[in-house]
Amino acid sequence: MSDQLHDDPQPLVAHLTELRDRLLRALLSVLLIFICLFPFANEIYTFVSEPLRALLPEGSSMIATDVASPFLTPFKLTLVTAIFLAIPVILYQLWAFVAPGMYRTEKRVAFPLLASSVILFYAGAAFAYFVVFPLIFAFFTSVGPSDVAVMTDINRYLDFVLKLFFAFGIAFEIPIAAVILIWTGVMTPEALAKKRPFIIVGCFVFGMLLTPPDVISQSLLAIPMWMLFEVGVFFGRFVLKRRLETDDTP
């Protein structure tokens, strides 16, 4: 009896040890990427700030109002970039930890969803950089008073764009959320479709809360979210059909 009590905690200890190892590998991947990118910190910031700098009036430039900003701002951006690039490794470590406890049918759906979520997050960030930033910065730099020089602080600019990167990255995960709801049986495609009016309103509310207070940026977030919701419902029908076929198979 005493031996049994002594042996019972071992599986839990083994799981915790594996979780620790997975977390360390994820952190190590972030650290290695950060070390490789840090020598190019200023170039990375130059690339990220290009959508605004290209639209600044002639003679204007970005400024640093804090003493440490010229160092800390590129440092912070490089760290965030390292995490951003390490997302596939981080999610793989999560998958490797969870996968042994999943059924084969769950793995067949979960892994494609995991891979799709990474691609969609990157797609959302790319959409923000290449489509949204030029439009909203063109709007901001053109509506100000003519006698006011546009000279944005580098740290405030970074906070602004990181917020938009995150907002659009999360927004582009809507198809994954819709497919998961349908796959798990929480919602049916028909039930989600009936909630379309509420989803549209929610998309614009989400856009209002996470973007600057202008119609352009709010619409550029809300409309793609709505379209992605429709994509999620569309693919959710196929996932549901596949699940029902698997359940009917003896």
Image: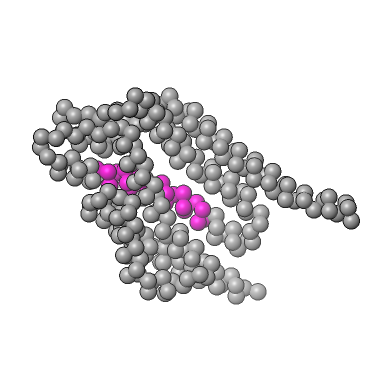
User: Relative to 106, does residue 89 appear above or below in the rendering?
Assistant: above
- The residue sitting at the front extreme is 66
Taking 19 as reference, is 69 left or right?
Answer: left
Q: Quadrant of the C terminus?
A: bottom right
Q: Residue at x 77, y 51 (%)?
A: 9
Q: Nearer the viewer, residue 141 or 126?
A: 141
The reply to whether residue 47 is visible in this rendering is no
Q: Nearer the viewer, residue 216 or 2?
A: 2
What range is drawn magenta here?
112-134
Q: Position of residue 10 (x, y in %)?
A: 77, 49
User: Relative to 35, does residue 119 appear above or below in the rendering?
Assistant: below
Q: Quadrant of residue 51?
A: top left
Q: Residue at x 56, y 40 (%)?
A: 26
The reply to whether residue 50 is visible in this rendering is yes
Residue 39 drawn in magenta: no
Q: Position of residue 80 (x, y in %)?
A: 43, 37
Q: Residue at x 82, y 51 (%)?
A: 7
Q: Residue at x 30, y 37 (%)?
A: 157
Q: Position of residue 184 (x, y in %)?
A: 53, 67
Q: Nearer the viewer, residue 149 or 175?
A: 149
Q: Quadrant of the N terminus?
A: bottom right
Residue 131 drawn in magenta: yes
Taking 115 as reference, is 11 left or right?
Answer: right
Q: Quadrant of residue 228?
A: bottom left
User: Relative to 117, does residue 130 appear above or below in the rendering?
Assistant: above
Q: Position of residue 72 (x, y in %)?
A: 40, 28
- Please count the marks in the image: 0
Provide the major secondary structure of the magenta segment.
helix
